[in-house]
Amino acid sequence: MKIYHGSYTVVGNPKILTDGFYKDFGFGFYCTNKENQAKKWARTKKQNHVVNIYHYEEDKSLKIRHFQEMSEEWLDFVVACRQGKEHDYDIVEGPMADDTIWDYIEDFVDGVITREAFWVLVKFKYPTHQIVFCTNAALETIKYEGSYTV
């Protein structure tokens, strides 16, 4: 599978980043199978806008969590990761909680909206995808193919 990483620089040798704020699926190296989404990620950077391209070959011996769609399990997993709770997966793949969806998640966590209201609000959001490589063993499954500026 071809995957992409939006950045401000060429990332020929990805690394697991464990600093900064908590993300949907915890710390790791984030990619997507949607090229346009990677372009959007790259354009959020203040300097340079680079899309890195990789080939991903799934390794069934790794511990992989795959969310086909936003679900109750996905919501609980994202909330836990965004609160800093760690998991033991090598790779996690599924929909992304963009800024709008994250606002709804925060409202849910804060008790401003119910779980049911959350699902009504996110129902019409465009499909997104992210795959995070959480361990060095997971990074071994991707091979850098090149990059370009957007």
Image: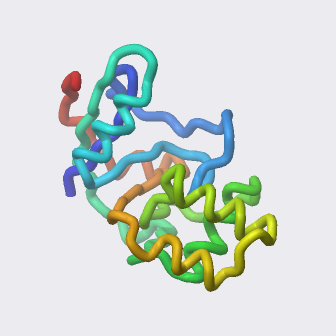
* Residue farthest to the right, as pictured: 110
- The residue at 43%/24% (across/down) is 45
As rendered, which of 114 and 29 lies closer to the eye?
Answer: 114
Q: Is residue 57 left or right of residue 73?
A: left
Q: In which quarter of the image is the N terminus?
A: bottom left
Based on the displayed image, in which of its 4 quarters is residue 58 positioned? bottom left
Q: In this view, does 19 lie to the left or right of 68?
A: right
Residue 147: image x %, image y %?
Answer: 21, 28
* Above-or-below relation of 20 to 118: above
- The residue at 41%/14% (across/down) is 47
- The residue at 36%/20% (across/down) is 9
Residue 99: image x %, image y %?
Answer: 53, 50
Residue 123: image x %, image y %?
Answer: 44, 76
Residue 41: image x %, image y %?
Answer: 38, 37
Based on the displayed image, in which of its 4 quarters is residue 39 positioned? top left
* Residue farthest to the top, as pictured: 47
Q: Is residue 11 left or right of residue 132?
A: left
Q: Total number of numbered labels? A: 0
* Above-or-below relation of 77 to 133: below
- The residue at 62%/53% (across/down) is 26
Q: In which quarter of the image is the C terminus?
A: top left
* Above-or-below relation of 142 to 58: above
Describe the colour scheme in one phrase.
rainbow
* Above-or-below relation of 33 to 52: below
